[in-house]
Amino acid sequence: MIGKILRGLLALVITLLVVVAGALLYRAWRQCENAQDLSIRTPRGIEEAMYVRLGGVDQWVQIRGDDRSNPVLLFVHGGPGFAESPL
């Protein structure tokens, strides 16, 4: 009886480990795919991220585009705590 329970628990633990490992591998694969999709590949492109002091406070700024001769558009969102970067 106890041997049956231990085998069942061992099977459950192995199944959970396989599922977690699969999920982590899938996540790593998707991150790599997304990084390739979002990369700037043109020779005149620009992709920079840095802190810039604006109004006495360090602000995170990202500059991305396919043509570096275009002007930079500074978008200031409406309030604290709401990041626009995923959009």
Image: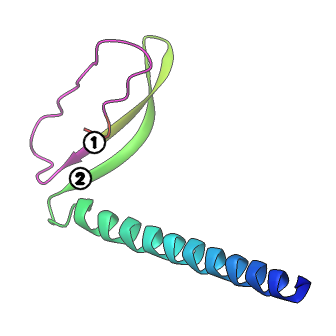
Horizontal side, residue 74 vs residue 82: left or right: left
The part of the image, by quadrant, that contains residue 27 is bottom left
The quadrant of the image that shows the C terminus is top left
Tag 2 near tag 1, CB within 8 Å: yes
Which residue is rendered at x = 19% and y = 67% of the image? 41
Residue at disc 1, secondary structure:
strand
Residue on which the image places disc 1: 63
Which residue is rendered at x = 43% and y = 73% of the image? 26
Which residue is rendered at x = 70% and y = 84% of the image? 11
Q: Which residues are magenta?
A: 63-84
Q: CA distance from mark 2 to mark 1?
A: 7 Å
Q: How many marks?
A: 2
Q: Nearer the viewer, residue 56 or 36?
A: 36
Q: Position of residue 62 (x, y in %)?
A: 33, 40
Q: Nearer the viewer, residue 67 or 76?
A: 76
Horizontal side, residue 12 vs residue 79: left or right: right
* Residue 85: in magenta span: no
**Image position of 66 with respect to 1: above or below:** above
Q: Position of residue 40 (x, y in %)?
A: 22, 61
Q: Nearer the viewer, residue 78 or 4?
A: 4
**Image position of 22 with respect to 31: above or below:** below
Residue 46, disc: 2
* Residue 70: in magenta span: yes
User: Magenta part mainly helix, strand or loop?
Assistant: loop
Density class for disc 1 (Cα within 10 Å; few <14, some 14-19, many ≥20) is few
Residue at disc 2, secondary structure:
strand
Q: Position of residue 64 (x, y in %)?
A: 23, 47
Q: Amino acid at mark 2?
A: Ile
